[in-house]
Image (cartoon, rainbow, N blue to C red):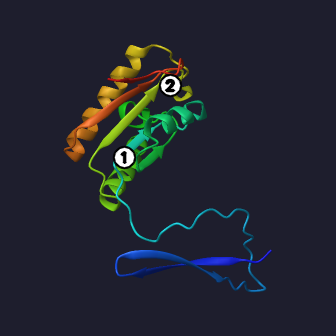
């Protein structure tokens, strides 16, 4: 298999990608296991910074609902729990640093927080009202900290997505 690297070439505001042979040192310890389309080195602007749980059951809902947008995702166990009811103060501080980095580096001007019922980080609570309260609490913290309106989304185990 021949190995290639991609070189981005910019000519008068047009963009072209050239494929050039990649030299591999004999002592190299990495083995390429997948090749996708090249990723531009340019920075991007995220439409939203999204804080959500990493529960795989909701991955398809995320893709279906946000697919047409370029977003920064912060996915951690419990998502909003880390702000609304953190077990340790460091958990909330970590989330705040990640959101701050997204806003600074990718110039996002919107924050979305997402909760879902049956979340293992909450012990599997099903009650929608409980999660709405958690979403509101997390949004208040973020609105005070970043002076931005925060969108609150609830994803239900039945596949529904609700704005709170």
- Of residue 75 and residue 122, the one placed in the foreground of this image is 75
- Earlier along the polypeptide chain: callout 2 or callout 1? 1
Return the residue at label 1: 49
Give the residue at x 35% y 49%: 99
From the viewer's side, name the closer residue of 89 and 147: 147
Q: Residue at x 50, y 41 (%)?
A: 76
Q: Is residue 108 left or right of residue 25?
A: left
Give SS at disc 2: helix
Above or below residue 132? Residue 6 is below
Residue found at x 37% / y 35%:
113
Q: Quadrant of residue 147?
A: top left
Q: Nearer the viewer, residue 55 or 60?
A: 60
Q: Which mark is residue 122?
A: 2
Mark 2 or 1, closer to the camera: 1
Q: Secondary structure at mark 1?
A: strand
Number of residues whose C-alpha sits closer than 10 Å to that of mark 1, classed few (under 14), some (14–19) or many (20 or more): many
Q: Where on the picture, by quarter, is residue 88?
A: top left
* Residue 1: % across, % down: 80, 74
Q: Is residue 140 left or right of residue 56?
A: left
Residue 141 position, x and y percent, is 27, 37
Question: Can you say which quadrant of the picture contains the C terminus?
Answer: top left
Measuring from the top left, give residue 118's x and y in whole percent: 54, 21
Q: Give the number of the disc on residue 106.
A: none
């Amino acid at each position: 298999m021949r190995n290639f690297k991609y070189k981005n070439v910019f000519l008068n505001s047009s963009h072209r990608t050239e494929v050039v042979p990649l030299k591999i040192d004999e002592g190299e310890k990495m083995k390429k296991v997948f090749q996708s389309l090249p990723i531009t080195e340019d920075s991007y602007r995220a439409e939203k910074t999204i804080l959500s749980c990493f529960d795989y059951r909701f991955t398809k809902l995320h893709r279906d609902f946000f697919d047409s947008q370029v977003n920064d995702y912060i996915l951690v166990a419990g998502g909003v729990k880390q702000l609304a009811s953190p077990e340790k103060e460091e958990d909330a501080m970590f989330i705040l640093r990640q959101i701050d980095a997204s806003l600074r580096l990718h110039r996002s001007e919107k924050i979305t927080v997402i909760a879902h019922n049956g979340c293992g980080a909450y012990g599997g609570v099903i009650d929608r009202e409980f999660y709405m309260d958690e979403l509101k609490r997390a949004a208040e913290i973020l609105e005070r900290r970043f002076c931005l309106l925060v969108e609150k989304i609830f994803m239900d185990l039945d596949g529904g997505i609700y704005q709170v």
